[in-house]
């Protein structure tokens, strides 16, 4: 397995075409793109630490070696639980994305679907997939995942769009591979990964074959352009002389990009679906199933741990931690967070082999959906309480740079202290600001799909007939 | 194991002193006390049905025989999950209490605490307990549990009360046993059980030894009086010529009583704690831990299944089941219910041996608490949506007796029909009325302890120090 | 104006055909129908009390005399505010419907619509209406209102129903009047009123002329049958030897009936709309506008005052009123209630003359809608907190009759006391039970229309174009 | 009255000592401090526009001239309603603070309290106040307000603090005036005002006389230092080549500062309280009363109008505005906003003269408190829905600068378009980002005091005794 240093070295040799804020930047130089690299390095580092090995690594049945869990295909409920555990742990350690998370979940979804296609259609997708997976495992490569298409006019299907590029699609099939066009938006972490695993954004229908395409693509392949998100947090990071003045000093906000495919060539050995529309819906459904448990649930539990910890710490710094209403609010944050955690645990521990006979495991879908739904609303509640206890300071604090300014330093020290010195209160307030006045509310809402999608899934997954029968029986109604 | 018929026969021979509505009633004759008996009989019946055997029964390590799970001490996570599953199943089948539920949870709490006392103090409580448990198992007896004391003046400890009887206590220790006085309130099902298992309502302190008492008492022991609850539902059941006109025809509302102990003699072999104040807090805490998963969580999931089923059915009877806002509401009910279910599943599957070395298993406490908290608020939401979709009819419907009245029957048939005949709509509306305009909202709120108690537990159980450290580390704050 | 005694006397001479629980009952003898009469009598009484005169009465511009506000057509914002104030006051005094409330709001809606029809169509509806209104005022008659039709198959319009009777309609127009058939459901108070004012349940379209009918009908007119609701509370009242043992001793639950029109003759002088479909939507919309303020908002504020008072009192009886979480919950109840009150006040004080030139006033529609929406969700919250603080006792208490039973009275006195004697705690718990375990949750939800209807109204009433423009202007977007 | 141009000119001649981001900046040059000046200029401008004159101006009873409503003391309910209307209007126009709002409310609170002190104590504060007010009115000066002290150790009273400077206080009384030390935090707009009106942060007690001080101080008085807040939004504004790329191009976020008083001399004619501890609590209470209506309620309604408008517009740009769940969410935003508006309208229209005989009017306190409480929770809900409908784009969008980049512009145009071109979607998404991923959630929560303060006020203001009596009377309980 790669060390963090080896990962960093491997990134040096890449040269992805990245744009940010209207100009081209270098991955290893721009302060914002660096946060992605740093986060990935930390994930490699965690896998090296003995106390996290159980969660961060697994033994591959393909290579027989210990590998990163980010590249492991779950084969048991225990695997699922540890996978969710990894999501919580990396969130606790990073305060942002484990950028290999979507990659892990697309790989897990592809494992089963390629197995199924080979069984049903006599294709060799699964063999290709396993070959490539072994290569990824042997080289311990960081994989991001590309899922969400721009979608253009929401009232039209992919094939009816004025510009077909708003959905990733195959423009040419050649003997050695395919050529793809389109884009993936809100893409987390492609710029700092070795590869990106791409799957369709939704189920395709007959006639939409060219949109039913899944493949792996190396970072910086010809035709790939990454257009990074740009937010106030990007600007602040650009301006700050030292990362320590930032809300999440090393790892920053969750950074995404528009990943543009402008006639990108993909050799057949990296193509895992190409036209099998019948399987495309099942592919995205399986991805959703696992991603709602991991990104929708477990990841945000890790964030909540950080926010609860920061909020309780701030209450203590301000000397108000025993006030009944403070205890009540902290408890409410815990309630939300532990409910989400319970849902992800249940999703993992009630997971099942899917497809039957494959040996691959998927979490329980209903429990994954309620994990995400609990988080979606709950995260805004948690932000609310963090802002409540963080106080006005969380949004009106001066820059920490004032502490080093001879003309204002003493004033700030004097007026920002409470039961703790101004220095730590400001530092912690900045950390809280990062959460309660930042991108995470809306980001968490949409991550792993918007709640409306989970609601539709939940309704569809529920056996209303049997519930109706229970009620009729007890009420004494004969049908 | 007893059949339902044998249980009913065994009840015939009892003659508990029951008062209801200001007068004495006979257990097997009064329409309300009969609902308790009927519910118990149904639980015996379920254990006889092959498809429920896995959930409703277990093999006793003490007798080597198949026994009711109501009398089983959990020895694995699987046991815990099935125990919770039993709670959901009986709720689905009864629409009211499995009246043996509290008994089961007090027995589970006593198993460990008596084991611990014997280990620490050299007492023989555990041996006594096991002897009695075997007797219960061999005779398949229905046990209710007595937990909640009247408490009198809430600002005073048990020993400081003007009237010591507001907490159950020992008034005399004799060579052959003890004499107890006091009462248990909101007691579910004692009138229809063979025995009641009594434990202290809270942790006692040094000086409060006489209140630290746990024991088993047979139904109808001398000195025992049962004063039943009386609600509008009791009255309606008294008046109705046929149970079919009632909201839950056979099993009714959850029926409780004040169980009065007026110098009741308990032989030593049925005494499982007597003065060991140090262990009393742990006893009630373990009871709470298991009861919050079962009664606080899993049981109400079963109720929710019924309510969701009835509401969806009513939407169909009214022809509005496809309206987007109806689908949204049904989905919200499912979300709440499945979140609760996930919490109970997680509580069971993350259960642990407790005390270590005992072989007995307890559910995870945090997950049990969030199961209950999810239910507490959620149940009111579910009632709200049931009332919404049930419509005004759920609270303004005429009596079904009108259908048999030649002067009004045609009118009611004409005006109460929609996409289904008036008969089934009225029957189902009555069933919904039973839930959304009845005792279950407040009952569910307080069952297994009021939410304020769960919040206090949740705050106490949470390791805030480690969360604070995670936040400080990421924010770059050195302590 | 009538005294309460005169009202009671006038009821003696009526003989409406009422069915309840499957049998015919006499208005002045049945314990349930009597609650309606008693409530009406109390409303007459309030009008006699000097401190309430300002709110309960007005001076009629038609008769020049002081009249009941229940028969007054609002002609100013002050009138609207006092009308809402009357709703709050009667709720505080009765704990149930002012059964003249719907009548008052239908009269207010008819005043304007008849004025408008006469102006536009040259009809004489308004003159008829004023004549009849003067008669009602001069004789101080109690009027209920009939609005909600059974509706049958919800997917079909009135004229497409298999059975046309599921919407009230005209079957015959004669020289002296019309004949109507159909029914009004969830009808509050018709049995104890002198007259009922009937309006269409919704806006009718061309071709549905026979359903666009509004009229006044005296209690007990030939062809009228009242089929009363029947609930557990009806049964309890039938059984109890003394009303003092009931949750709302004198006035009970809100009692409704199905009011059946089986070819009822209405003379022309009592017909206020007959076929003018174009005006029927406006008629029901104006009714909704005023009724959402009064019934949807102000009335429930009065209920909330009672529930808050009872809950705070119970906290004191139990000695827990200073616990921070109790204060928090009481405060939350107040917050909900005062928010609703503010919305109704705003609805009244921003009311407008409508139709312009008529001199009649209607409340602000948006504010009336949010009053109702605040109440709908808020009332369930209030019930939740009442159940929380009321405690298990609110749903598991024994009958107060036990206090008079020599065998159980002492037990109950001993075990039900806390910081107050058992007698008052039980009495108050019964009162709380009436609210938190009764019909009011679902009843309040649907009263004045279901929240879904208010949401649709709110969306339709909002000027989204101007809000979009504000946003575009500030964002710097040119259209 | 000043024109916007005259205001800008007057700012040119000031030279306040402002620090921002660790360095000193010039008011009229720094892009962030300029937003405050621009916002103030716009408020002057609005007063010049005929269609806003009614709301933005009033006629002074002191000068007989038309003046800015920001300097008017309310003398009627109509004044109160227009004052709240001004708050909504300026929020709609600015999307940030009317920075003269706190100044207006401190002046209104001082009007009554100085009148009262003169009446009771024979002081001449009111005469001084009126003289100064006339000066402000005649010169149409912009006044900010300074209220919130740093507070240091929250467990100690002002006089017990280690460093007395954490509360503003008098250090010296001279014949010509007083010298004050301390600071006001979260101060909105002082840097761009002509004067700041300072009042105590809370009620002071005997022995705390030096902290009971109120006064006016001109911008840039010797000893005054302003340390500005610094957030990611500050950084983004510093970096952007054109304001059009920012979320609120001209007026930005709400900008505050720590306003430091380092031995600032205040002449007696500008001192309006000095040691009268008995009146200090009433002063802050009256300020709170008016500020909760204006800042707590009405202002945020204006923000909500903008957010609702932007969200609906974005739904249309994306082509999803007819989806039922979108309509439901927009309606929910409207519900919250209109409920808040209703509360402020009720607060204004039920306002009262206070103190009696003074001629000054204050809004209703309970309704002002519920206005703020509705907003506090509601604003997070509104942000949630804005983020939902704004979509992932609201937090992952690239910089608009990409549109001008030849290498990425076409990609962004292609992939960011939907039912509207990429340009307007990006612009609007940036506007939405400004709300749903910014400072306004926590800022709105704490503005006009944290909700916990409003809850305490609400509980204290409620007459629980009369509610208890209503309940007891109806339940038949005699005391």
Image (cartoon, coloured by chain):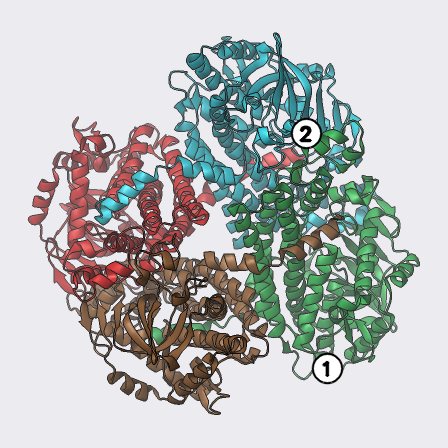
Chain colours: A green, B brown, C red, D cyan
Task: Give the quadrant of residue A21.
Answer: top right
Mark 1 or 2: the one toward you: 2
| Vertical placement of residue B5 versus A212, above or below | below
Locate residue B166, reporting x and y percent.
Answer: 32, 61
Separation of marks 1 and 2 at Cα, in angstroms: 68 Å
Front residue of D166/C401: it is: D166
Task: Give the quadrant of residue A286.
Answer: bottom right
Residue displayed at 67% across by 17% down: D264
Answer left or right for B319 relative to A428: left
Name the mark on residue A121.
Answer: 1
Classify 10 Å Cα crowding around label 1: few (below 14), some (14-19), many (20 and above).
Answer: few
Give the residue number, with chain letter if any, for mark 2: D257
Answer left or right for D343 relative to A383: left
| Vertical placement of residue C4 versus B416, above or below | above
Front residue of D15/D253: it is: D15
Q: Can residue C468 be seen in this view?
A: no
């Amino acid at each position: 397995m790669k060390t963090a240093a080896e990962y960093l070295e491997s990134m040096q040799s890449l040269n992805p075409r990245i744009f940010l804020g209207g100009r081209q930047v270098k991955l290893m130089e721009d302060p914002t793109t660096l946060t992605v690299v740093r986060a990935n390095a930390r994930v490699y580092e965690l896998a090296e630490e003995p106390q996290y090995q159980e969660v961060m690594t697994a033994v591959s049945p393909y290579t027989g070696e210990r590998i990163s869990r980010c590249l492991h295909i779950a084969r048991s409920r225990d695997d699922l639980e540890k996978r969710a555990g990894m999501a919580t742990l990396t969130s606790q350690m990073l305060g942002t994305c484990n950028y290999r998370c979507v990659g892990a979940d697309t790989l897990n979804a592809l494992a089963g679907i390629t197995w199924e296609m080979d069984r049903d259609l006599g294709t060799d997708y699964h063999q290709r997939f396993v070959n490539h997976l072994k290569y990824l495992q042997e080289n311990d490569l960081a994989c991001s995942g590309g899922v969400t298409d721009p979608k253009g006019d929401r009232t039209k299907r992919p094939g009816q769009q004025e510009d077909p590029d708003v959905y990733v699609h195959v423009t040419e099939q050649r003997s050695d591979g395919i050529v793809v066009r389109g884009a993936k938006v809100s893409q987390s972490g492609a710029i700092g990964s070795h590869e990106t695993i791409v799957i369709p954004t939704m189920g395709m229908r007959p006639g939409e074959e060219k949109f039913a395409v899944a493949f792996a693509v190396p970072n910086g392949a010809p035709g790939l352009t990454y257009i990074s998100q740009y937010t106030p947090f990007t600007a602040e990071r650009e301006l700050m002389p030292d990362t320590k003045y930032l809300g999440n000093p090393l790892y920053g906000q969750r950074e995404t990009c528009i990943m543009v495919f402008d006639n990108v060539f993909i050799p057949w050995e990296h193509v895992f679906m190409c036209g099998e529309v019948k399987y495309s819906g099942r592919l995205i459904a399986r991805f959703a199933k696992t991603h709602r448990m991991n990104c929708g649930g477990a990841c945000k539990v890790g964030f909540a741990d950080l926010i609860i910890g920061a909020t309780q710490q701030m209450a203590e710094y301000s000397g108000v931690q025993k006030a009944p209403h403070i205890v009540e609010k902290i408890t409410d944050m815990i309630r939300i967070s532990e409910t989400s955690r319970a849902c992800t645990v249940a999703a993992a521990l009630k997971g099942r082999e899917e497809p039957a006979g494959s040996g691959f495991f998927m979490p329980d879908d209903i429990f994954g959906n309620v994990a995400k739904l609990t988080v979606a609303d709950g995260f805004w509640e948690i932000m609310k309480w963090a802002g409540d206890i963080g106080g006005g300071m969380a949004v009106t604090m001066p820059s920490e740079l004032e502490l080093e300014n001879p003309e204002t330093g003493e004033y700030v020290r004097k007026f920002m202290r409470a039961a703790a010195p101004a220095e730590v209160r400001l530092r912690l307030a900045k950390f809280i600001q990062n959460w309660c006045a930042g991108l995470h509310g809306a980001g968490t809402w949409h991550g792993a799909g918007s709640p409306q999608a989970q609601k539709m899934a939940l309704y569809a997954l529920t056996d209303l007939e049997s519930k109706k029968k229970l009620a009729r029986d007890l009420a004494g109604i004969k049908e």
